[in-house]
C-alpha cells in the first residue's frame, strides 16, 4: 500500500489551499497512493505571529463547506489535513481525516507550544479510528514530543500514526542551512523514535517555506516500524511516497521484540 506525506506552504487563501490539496491528491491517486497527509493548518495557514498580534487562521466547522470540499477531493483516498476548528464555543488546532465520502476522524492538538494557547483551546486526548487503509491515529506537531501521546494511539490499536506539523527552524542561532538546523534534527529524531518505540508506520507531513516570522523545515517522511525512513522530501517542498505492506511490517517488527506486548505497566510511575 502506498502512503504519502506532503511538505508544502499553505496560507490564508483557503481556495488556493484547497486547489493545492486537490492537485496533490490527484497526482497521488494516479500513482496508486491510498493515504495522503497534509501539514498542520493546511486549510488557512498557521499562526504567522507567535506573539498573537496577527489575525488568526479562518475558523472552520467540521460540518462546514470547506471540509465538505475536502471530502469531495479525497474521493476513495484517505486524506488528512490540519485546520482551525470552530465547534461553536471554542477554537482548536485540529486535524481531520476524510475518505470514502465522509469524515473519518478528528484530532484536536493537546500540547501547545509557546503562546499557541492564546488562540486555541487544548484537545483532551488521543484515540485511533478505523479507515479504509487500516486503523489510524493522528497527532499534531508538538504532540509528538510527548511519548505518551504516540503510545496511547499504539495501545488503541493504531497501525499508522499520522503526525501533521507546522514545525519551524530554530528562531535563535538558526543555521542558514535547514538540513543542519537543530530543530530539523529534532523533528526527524522524534519521527523515527516514535515509530520505533511503538512499532508503527509513521506518516509525517510538515509546512515548508516561510510564513510570517517562521521558516519551516519541511522534511515530510514515511517511517517504518523499525524507525527507518522509507521516503523523505528533505528540507524542501514535495511529496514523500513509500509502498509498504502495513500489517506485514507490523507483524515482522513485533514478532520477537514486541514493545507493546512486553510492557510492564506495574513498574511505571503514573503521576
Image (cartoon, rainbow, N blue to C red):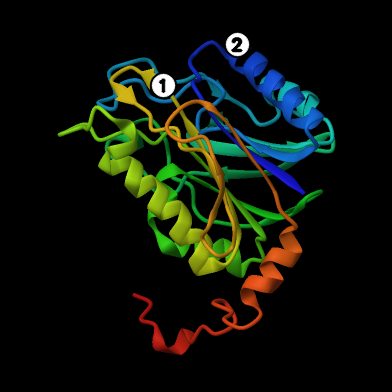
Residue 230 % position (x, y): 58, 50
**Separation of disc 2 and disc 1 at Cα?**
16 Å
Q: Which residue lies at the image location 49% right of the left edge and 68% below the top edge?
A: 197
Q: Which residue lies at the image location 81% right of the left edge and 28% below the top edge?
A: 30
Question: How would you rate the neighbour count of disc 1 (Cα within 10 Å): few for under 14, some for 14-19, many for 20 or more?
Answer: some
Q: Nearer the viewer, residue 205 or 49?
A: 205
Left or right of 105, for residue 118 = left
Question: How would you rate the neighbour count of disc 2 (Cα within 10 Å): few for under 14, some for 14-19, many for 20 or more?
Answer: some
Q: Nearer the viewer, residue 238 or 22?
A: 238
Total numbered badges shown on the rendered structure: 2
Residue 256 in view in this figure: yes
Quadrant in the picture for the C terminus: bottom left
Q: Nearer the viewer, residue 206 or 223?
A: 223
Residue 165 % position (x, y): 47, 38
Above or below, 108 against 125 in this view is above
Above or below, 255 against 220 in this view is below
Residue 90 in view in this figure: no
Q: Nearer the viewer, residue 46 or 87?
A: 46
Q: Earlier in the sequence, mark 2 or mark 1?
A: 2
Q: Residue furthest left?
A: 173
Residue 52 % position (x, y): 29, 24
Above or below, 80 against 124 in this view is above
Q: Secondary structure at mark 2?
A: helix
Task: Give residue 226's quadrant in the image.
Answer: bottom right
Q: Secondary structure at mark 1?
A: loop
Q: Which residue lies at the image location 74% right of the left edge and 21% below the top edge?
A: 69
Instruction: Tell me whether circle 2 and circle 1 mark residues in contact (CB < 8 Å).
Output: no
- Badge 2 is on which residue? 16
- Badge 1 is on which residue? 209
Left or right of 231, for residue 185 = left
Given this view, does label 2 or label 1 mark the residue nearer the observer? 1
Q: Which residue lies at the image location 20% right of the left edge and 32% below the top edge?
A: 174
Amino acid at each position: 500500500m502506498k502512503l504519502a506525506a506532503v511538505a508544502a506552504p499553505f496560507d490564508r487563501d483557503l481556495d488556493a489551499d484547497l486547489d493545492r490539496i486537490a492537485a496533490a491528491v490527484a497526482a497521488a491517486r494516479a500513482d496508486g497512493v491510498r493515504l495522503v497527509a497534509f501539514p498542520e493548518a493546511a486549510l488557512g495557514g498557521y499562526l504567522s505571529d507567535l506573539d498573537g498580534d496577527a489575525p488568526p487562521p479562518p475558523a472552520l466547522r467540521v460540518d462546514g463547506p470547506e471540509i465538505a470540499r475536502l471530502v469531495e477531493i479525497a474521493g476513495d483516498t484517505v486524506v488528512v489535513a490540519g485546520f482551525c476548528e470552530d465547534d461553536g464555543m471554542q477554537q482548536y488546532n485540529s486535524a481531520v481525516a476524510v475518505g470514502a465520502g465522509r469524515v473519518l476522524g478528528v484530532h484536536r492538538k493537546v500540547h501547545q507550544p509557546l503562546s499557541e494557547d492564546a488562540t486555541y483551546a487544548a484537545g483532551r486526548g488521543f484515540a485511533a479510528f478505523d479507515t479504509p487503509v487500516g486503523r489510524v491515529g493522528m497527532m499534531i506537531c508538538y504532540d509528538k514530543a510527548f511519548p505518551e501521546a504516540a503510545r496511547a494511539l499504539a495501545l488503541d490499536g493504531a497501525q499508522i500514526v499520522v503526525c501533521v506539523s507546522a514545525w519551524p527552524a530554530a528562531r535563535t542561532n538558526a543555521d542558514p542551512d535547514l538540513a543542519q538546523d537543530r530543530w530539523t534534527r529534532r523533528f526527524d529524531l522524534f519521527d523515527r523514535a516514535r515509530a520505533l518505540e511503538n512499532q508503527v508506520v509513521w506518516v509525517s507531513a510538515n509546512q515548508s517555506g516561510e510564513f510570517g516570522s517562521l521558516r519551516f523545515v519541511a522534511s515530510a517522511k514515511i517511517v517504518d516500524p523499525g524507525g527507518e525512513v522509507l521516503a523523505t522530501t528533505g528540507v524542501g517542498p514535495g511529496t514523500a511516497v513509500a509502498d509498504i505492506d502495513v500489517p506485514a511490517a507490523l507483524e515482522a517488527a513485533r514478532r520477537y521484540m514486541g514493545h507493546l506486548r512486553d510492557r510492564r505497566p506495574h513498574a511505571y510511575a503514573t503521576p
